[in-house]
Amino acid sequence: MALHVGLGAIAAAGQAPLGWWWLSLLALGGIMAALPAQGGPRLWAGRLWLAGLGYFAASLFWIIEPFFIEPEIHGWMAPFALVFMAGGMALFWGLAGALAALYAPGRARLVALAGLMVGAELLRGWVFTGFPWAMLGHGLIGTPLMQLAAITGAGGLSLFLVLCAALPALGASPAQRGAGAGLAALVLGLGWAWGGMQADLPPDRAESVRLAQPNAPQAEKWREENIYLFFNRLLEQTSTSADPAPDLVLWPETAVPFLLEYPGDGLTMMADALAVHGGAARLGFGVQRLEDGRFFNSFAVLTPQAEVTHVYDKHHLVPFGEYIPFSEWLLGTPIGGLAGQALSGYTAGPGPVVLDMGHLGLVLPLICYESIFPRHLRTTPRPDWVLQVTNDAWFGALTGPYQHLAQARLRAVEQGLPVLRVANTGVSAFIDARGGIVSALPLNEAGVLDGPVPGALPPTFYASHGDWPLVLALALILLGAALIRRRY
């Protein structure tokens, strides 16, 4: 039990900020080698669940951070949240293990396990609205192998990693295991070389954008004495002159201390700060709004004349974090006003929306958590670039913000689109269409970042076809494993 939990925890070293993909590869190989060739579904499910428990506990321990924003109230729930989250995510690994053990006994069933583990990861992106965080393939973000995601998506990276981990474990003798390790090294080398050749980038767009990072810690952000401190900081960051002047200034999620419908002098103050850059400049900002008794987590665009021209409502909400599932069914419909916000949270918007922002191009806004779902970026029309506004202050300072940033980089590769990311406490960044970080503001520092919008590549294979080719490949792997009867 300790062996599998420990190997699972080591496999998490591939996740950001460490990015030790090679250690993750070795740990996955160890997990597979430790599985008994003659074991039944119950044994394999138990061993894989234990490995998953270690993996997800180490990958997702940032989940405890929100409970320590007000530790005197919520701190006691933190360990329960981590245990239940890790144990629940590990069930997907356990399911893969149980199904793999139904194949003919022998080491060849590891091939089926590789396919089933990736299939379980894809499933994890949909069940109960989905949570595709800490996928095994995320360990390859930042390496040349990341470029494979333009063809296969994140699931393909996971399959590549798991198959390479399985190759040495397929051997029955030291010589066969050595040959498997050599083959895995060759495959890794070829993938690395191919990814390294994918370096071409289109020219930058002419428009200049400013990212404003106020660095408002979540525990201090809404204290009465600090509310206008951080708002005024954003105003100052907006009005600071630059050459060239920004065409668009971006503020993070829930950046302003008022509802969009009841701004007081807030929008006028923002417009005055923006007007320094000329009449064509725009300000995009995260804001909460109220409509028909329902609250929305939104993104809005403002002109120097204090006119709101675009509004997007977050449509993929965090269960229990931004809304309580089935609350209307339990408490009645509708739940309006302040009681609704307290009891049921936000209301979901209708879905992804591409905003036509004139000379700034077609922009796809994503709010926080939405960026971890590749399906939300496959829109019609295709945007010219992607914008993510987020408040990663909820995630602490060790792993969560860096893992969130890494997934934004992967979305860029999958779609061949640049991503501009503005975060309350960081990391705010310009990300090019190959997933490279052009420039960034460090975590937990206030500042501004000016730069042109990186250019977009043509639609990638993954952008056009999504996960269906990978699903077909997984089906073929499972079919092939079912036909194998030779013992390894």
Image (tube, rainbow, N blue to C red):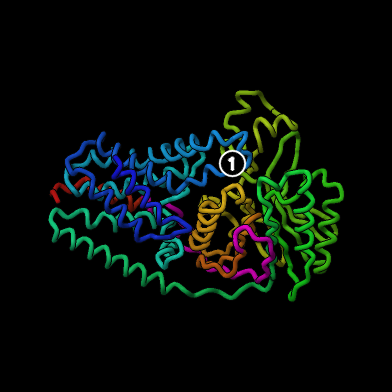
* Residue visible at 35% across and 51% down in the picture: 472
Q: Closest to the observer: 73 or 426?
A: 73
* Residue visible at 74% across and 67% down in the picture: 247
Q: Give above or below for 108 relative to 192.
A: above
Query: Dot 1 surroundings within 10 Å: few (below 14), some, or many (20 or more)?
Result: some
* Residue visible at 45% across and 37% down in the picture: 83
Q: Closest to the observer: 233 or 124?
A: 233
Judge from the rendering whether residue 228 lies leftward or rightward of residue 132; answer left or right: right
Q: Is residue 383 magenta?
A: no
> Which kind of residue does numbered mark 1 sit on?
Phe
The magenta segment is: 442-471
> Would you name the residue on which mark 1 appears?
68
Q: Give above or below for 120 relative to 465.
A: above
Furthest toward the front, the residue is 72
Q: Secondary structure at mark 1?
A: helix
Residue 437 appears at what percent x and percent y?
A: 55, 67
Can see residue 480? no
Residue 400 appears at what percent x and percent y?
A: 53, 51
